[in-house]
Image (cartoon, rainbow, N blue to C red):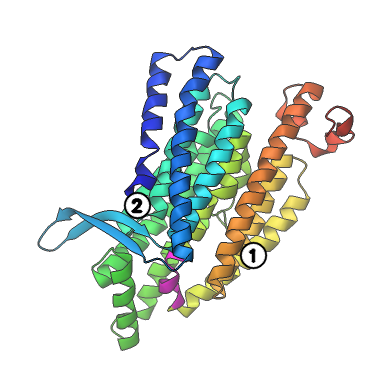
Amino acid sequence: AWIISFVPIPAIISIGLGLMLIPTAAKNARRMWAFPSVSLLSIVMIISADLSIQQINGGYVYQYLCSWIINNDFSFEFGHLIDPLTSIMSTLITTVGIMVLIYSDNYMSHDQGYLRFFTSMGFFTISMLGLVTSTNFVQIYIFWELVGMCSYLLIGFWFTRPIAANACQKAFVTNRVGDFGLLLGILGFYWITGSFEFRELFEMLNNLISNGGVNSFFVTLCAFLLFVGAVAKSAQFPLHVWLPDAMEGPTPISALIHAATMVAAGIFLVARLFPLFRVIPHIMGLISFIGIITVLLGATLSLAQRDIKGSLAYSTMSQLGYIMLAPGIGSYRAALFHLITHAYSKALLFLGSGSVIHSMESIVGYSPDKSQNMVLMGGLTKYVPI
């Protein structure tokens, strides 16, 4: 299980060395350094697919723990958890990641930040894989923050453009609101149960609630704070404001982060904590309410967009509202099913929009206001025949 998170690390190291040693290398030399990212991530994809098949055939839940901090009153274990949810998410992350990296090889080939792009993408993939294989709250929070940091770097990839610089700052600040809520919720549940481990925490909390040994308001408040973290990461109302501006990054970044992986992290958190939320009725109702509001708001705003990536961004927000609504009404499997189908379809739409934008640049010139404007795309088949 450990190989899922750590195999891509050599690719990041090699690309980082290439970035330092040959920052101004020729195009073909730079592309050679990106090959390890695709090859090593392919190995992880094969392992993830094998684990998924084992889980489908009724394989056992695998958990490996290594003691990191041991004290008389406190102990923390770092490990890996392989269950159906982990296998589904790891397969999703690796398959979409590989397709995006292959697409990016040609899309970003003329960009001077080519190696920096692949380094950031590799680091982001490792962070997401570490997130979905986490066994406890502390571990999931560490990788949660790494995912946020990588998204900041990728959204602001073209940081010399003021719009992109402001967009990455907006995403960073908005997600910090959710991260602060997540941290407070984690500390609150540790104060109640004395454990960060998911299984122990769920069992102890169920016993405390059934026996009336805990204040129901405080438990509901802590669960709400955990949900705030998921709301920010998955662009749910009212912390959705960062997602449309995040389209200022390169199109492959929009496909990977804002269609398949980063926005799915919030859904993953709700799915992972579903046994906890299920025993707190008020939280389930809140999840459903936020999902419904996000569905309606995202779909309405999407209709008013002229920017092709902006329209896809609000469409993503609306579909994430559907996915968030499902666990709120107790339909856990429906949420995961729609998460998978939406991730692949929306990633394809973003990559397709990148091809259209490139085609428009040869007609209207390099101007995002024109090349991404759907009003100006009439008669495009004359210039870009199928």
Q: Which residue is mark 1?
A: 293
Residue at 50% x, 45% y: name it. 94
Three-letter amino acid code of the residue under disc 1: Ile
Query: Residue 210 occupies which quadrant of the picture?
Result: bottom left
Q: Main secondary structure of the magenta part?
A: helix
Relative to 245, residue 165 above or below: above
Q: What mark, if any, has residue 1 been given in the picture?
A: 2
**Can you say whether 382 is above or below 223 in the image?**
above
Vertical side of 96 occupied by 355: above or below: above
Real-space CA distance between mark 1 and mark 2, rounded to the nearest whole angstrom: 38 Å
Along the polypeptide, which appears first: circle 1 or circle 2?
2
Give percent across and percent down for residue 235: 57, 53
Q: Left of 135 or right of it: where is 329?
A: right
Residue 326 is inside the magenta segment = no
What's the amino acid at mark 2?
A: Ala
Front position in the image: 177 or 279: 279
Front residue of 1 and 374: 1
| 229 lies above or below 19 | below
Residue 27: which numbered mark, if any?
none
Q: Quick check: can you spot residue 154? A: yes
- Give the side of residue 246 with respect to residue 196, left or right: right
In the picture, which quadrant includes the C terminus? top right
- Name which residue lies at 63% across and 27% down: 107
Q: What is the secondary structure assignment of the residue under circle 1?
A: helix
Where are the magenta residues, as a range?
271-278
Displayed quadrant of residue 254: top right
Q: Position of residue 168 (x, y in %)?
A: 52, 37
User: In the displayed image of the protein, which residue is found farthest to the left?
Assistant: 72
